[in-house]
Image (cartoon, helix red, strand yellow):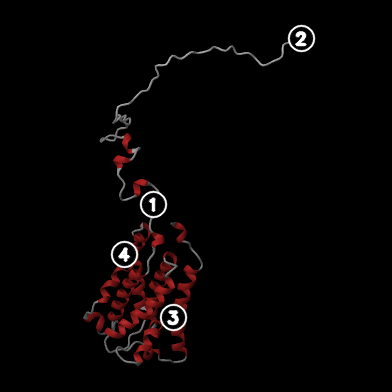
Amino acid sequence: MEKHFKFTNSVISLPLFFVVFLWFVFWLEIRFDFDFVQNGIYPRTFSGLQGVIFSTFIHSDIGHLYNNSIPLFVLMAALQFFYAKHSLSVVGYGILLSGLSTWLIGRENYHIGASGLIYVLFSFIFFKGIQTKYNRLIALSLAVIVVYGGLVWYVFPSPEITSGDKNISWEGHLGGLLTGFILSLVYKTPEYKKVIKYDWEHPDFNAADDKFMQRFDANGNFVNIPVEELKEPAFFYYCSLPVQYTVVTHKKNEPKPQS
């Protein structure tokens, strides 16, 4: 079981590369005075479809980028460590599906930022850990909900997040949350199921049939196993013919000494 959870260089390098690339894109925008906002998701328009791919890498200001960088790095590292087999697929399909759902249900405005992907990772790690029923992954799910559980409040529209300085794309958050849940159902992880080593771990185990458990009474005291009575009478056979025995003297098969 534990062989599936190995710390490799990719646990740090892949999330670090992704976050550094986001900062590189932001540097290009500032350095060369680009306006990448227009490459974001603009719902229900053909030109806005480009944002399904590009919006994750575009941020409005350094504060927006900084707030997304830390949770993105942490969640991607956790995904790479515990779900290395599916990490790239979850990130790739997470970007596409969450972006497409934002394009379908979003307000008529440009939607940018990696927060949709953050919600994908948050949702996938949480729901997948619960589904596996494995203690380490359940603990990871609880840790994620404790640290980032407040993110759930930003998937609902409210005047606080849809107006003013906090013009947050709750549609992107909702799309990411649903995408992560769907991906947790799609990607199976049978290798994380507990391997049954003992008979008493089977669901159909009956203690009354177990030889070891029979050595204990109802109060837990050690007792001897009762001797089973023969269900059928025993039959004994004998012979009435007389038996004659001949006694043979045992002699060593050695030559007699010569005088």
**Separation of residues labelled 2 and 3 (CA atoms):** 112 Å
Q: Disc 2 vs disc 4: Cβ atoms closer than 8 Å?
A: no
Residue 196 - label: 1
Q: Is residue 253 above or below residue 117?
A: above
Residue at the spot x=37%, y=66% of the render?
188
Tell me which numbered mark, 2 or 4, is placed earlier along the sequence: 4
Helix, strand or loop at mark 4: helix
Three-letter amino acid code of the residue under disc 4: Val
**Separation of residues labelled 1 and 4 (CA atoms):** 31 Å
Instruction: Tell which of 134 and 62 is nearer to you.
Output: 134
Tell me which numbered mark, 1 or 2, is placed earlier along the sequence: 1
Q: Which residue is denoted by mark 2 in the rendering?
A: 258
Residue 255 location, quadrant: top right
**Separation of residues labelled 2 and 4 (CA atoms):** 104 Å
Three-letter amino acid code of the residue under disc 1: Ile
Q: Which residue is denoted by mark 3 in the rendering?
A: 22
**Separation of residues labelled 1 and 3 (CA atoms):** 45 Å
Three-letter amino acid code of the residue under disc 3: Leu
- The residue carrying pointer 3 sits among few (fewer than 14), some (14 to 19) or many (20 or more) residues within 10 Å by Cα, namely many
Tell me which numbered mark, 1 or 3, is placed earlier along the sequence: 3
Instruction: Tell which of 255 and 92 is nearer to you.
Output: 255
Residue at the spot x=65%, y=15% of the render?
252
Three-letter amino acid code of the residue under disc 2: Gln
- Front label number (2 vs 3): 2
